[in-house]
Image (tube, rainbow, N blue to C red):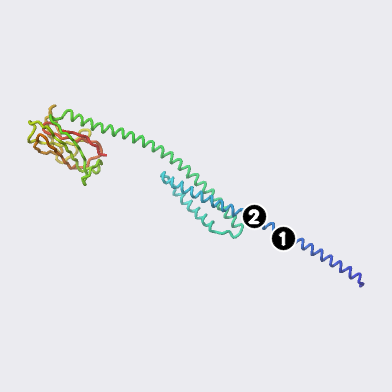
Amino acid sequence: MSDNQNSRIYIILVSVLLLLAAGLGFFFWQKSKNYLVENQKIEAERKQLETAKVNIESELDSLSTAYSNLRTENENLQGRISSTAALIAQKEAQISQIKATSAKDIEALRDQVTSLQKTKIEFETIILALRTENEDLKKENSRLAGENDQLKGANTELSGQVQDLAKQLEEQIRKTQSAVFKATSFRVEVERRNDKLTARARKAREIFVSFDLADVPQVYQGQQKLYLVVTDDKGTPIISQSPLKVTVFAPSGPVEITAQQVKEVVLENTQRETFNYKFDERLKSGNYVAAIYCDKGLLGVSSFRLR
């Protein structure tokens, strides 16, 4: 073979190899370019998902706080939150687990974001229902408060009417049964076991009545009996183990009384007298009248109230 032919073959082989190398180089370059673009795309998606995860976690934290506030408000409004509380506790545990778990790949990150989005929707649904319930409870409580105010007003009016009855009875007794001479500084106190004053029926133990007698006419001085009479506002004597029925002779005529206690005294021109009477039974709440009589009629009377 001649040198020219050898040169031609060599040139052809070199050309083929160069073309082949160029083709392979272009192929791998194109593949590398596509791979780089795909990696950039995945990395961009990862950053978006990570940002979305952080944002949703922040929103869930806010929703959790909102739920906690609504739950406290609901409890104050006497609502029922036991079922939602258990569900929220379960969801918060799932959120905590997702926060503590690092996504190994893009698919795991997608699953986490999807789960967080679902939980967020559930949170919002529960909060909306709870907020609606709270608003309904507020309206109901407001209505009940209004009714309660009306009842309080009615009770206050009724209490005033009842107390007026005691005052009317007190005045009637004073007008029709008074003796010629009268007690002054007439005071009625109700005491409990430790000798402290009280106005509460369940603590009432005994009654203490004090009064002054001044300028007692000479004809009425000397040995006398004083009677303590305690009645309710209808004039019914309170329960006593040893009631004493007596007729006293007031200037207006004879008066039948039922006394719980009697005390023998020697009346002088001026003196101070007291009665201490222990109840056989605790008095119920209501209005009462305490009166002191002598054989010549009423000396003093006053009404008192036990709550």
- The answer to which of 196 and 207 lies nearer the viewer is 196
In the picture, the quarter occupied by the C terminus is: top left
Left or right placement of residue 98 versus residue 218 in this view: right
Amino acid bearing label 2: Ala
Q: From the viewer's perspective, is 153 left or right of 207?
A: right
Residue underneath mark 1 = 32
User: Which element carries disc 1, helix, strand or loop?
Assistant: helix
Query: Which residue position holds label 2?
Result: 44
Check residue 180 in the rendering and tell me which mark sits there, or answer none. none
Q: Residues within 10 Å of mark 2 (few under 14, many from 20)?
A: few
Residue, x 67% and y 56% (percent of image)?
40
Locate the N terminus by quadrant. bottom right
Q: How many marks?
A: 2
55 vs 140, nearest the viewer = 55
Q: Residue at x 24, y 36 (%)?
A: 287
Secondary structure beneath dot 2 equals helix
CA separation, marks 2 and 1? 18 Å
Q: Is residue 267 above or below residue 12?
A: above
Residue 124 % position (x, y): 52, 47
